[in-house]
Amino acid sequence: MTVRSKLLTLILLAVASCGLLMPLHASAAVAVPINGTFTDAAGGTGHFVGTYSVQNFGVKNGGLVAIGTLVGTLTSSTGAVLGTITSANTALPATPGTSTCSILTLNLGAIHLNLLGLVVNLSPVNLNITAVSGPGNLLGNLLCAVANLLNGGAPDLGTLVTLLDRLLLAL
């Protein structure tokens, strides 16, 4: 290989690498069903049925959000259609409401003791303690935070958004 062809190869590799690092905006959309209820003008329970099509992800107020289009129909408690909604560029939180983390897992095998005529038998013991984090779970939030102290801290949301957009594009 000549010096010129080696240089050309290096330049092509550098350009390809830069292309992989640049953020993408996903062109594909993933539709998620959205259902809910509301109190209508008559005081009854109305229904909303629709879909949310995720186009990409972003960061809003320091949190991860999904950005997409919400389309649906509002129906009153009597069954009358009140209207339809089409809202583009709608941002919804993309973080789960609750999560769990393992605090302690203890597995003891069976134990048989014979102490001068006193026999003690213990069956196998499996102890699992799990903390549930989320709104209103003060102790669960605290224990999950302590259990994850050495996991590297808060994720870089910009990198996470780029990775999620690339994953969405691959779907």
Image (cartoon, helix red, strand yellow):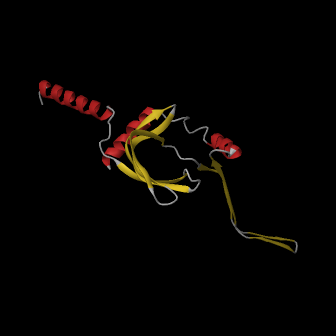
> What x and y, as percent, mark residue 165?
36, 40
Quarter residue 149 falls in:
top right
> What x and y, as percent, mark residue 152?
54, 36
Vertical position of residue 121 compared to residue 106: above or below: below
Residue at the (16%, 27%) spot, across then down: 8
Residue at the (18%, 30%) spot, across then down: 9
Quadrant for the N terminus, please: top left
Residue 1 appears in the figure:
yes
Residue 33 appears in the figure:
no
Vertical position of residue 115 compared to residue 74: above or below: below
Count of marks, rendered view: 0
> What x and y, as percent, mark residue 41?
55, 50
Vertical position of residue 142 compared to residue 123: above or below: above
Residue at the outermost front position: 42
Nearer to the camera, 15 or 86 = 86
Residue at the (42%, 39%) spot, across then down: 90
Vertical position of residue 102 compared to residue 145: above or below: below
Along the horizontal axis of the image, is 119 left or right of 55? Answer: right
Nearer to the camera, 34 or 24 = 34
Quarter residue 114 falls in:
bottom right
> What x and y, as percent, mark residue 148?
60, 41
Nearer to the camera, 68 or 161 = 68
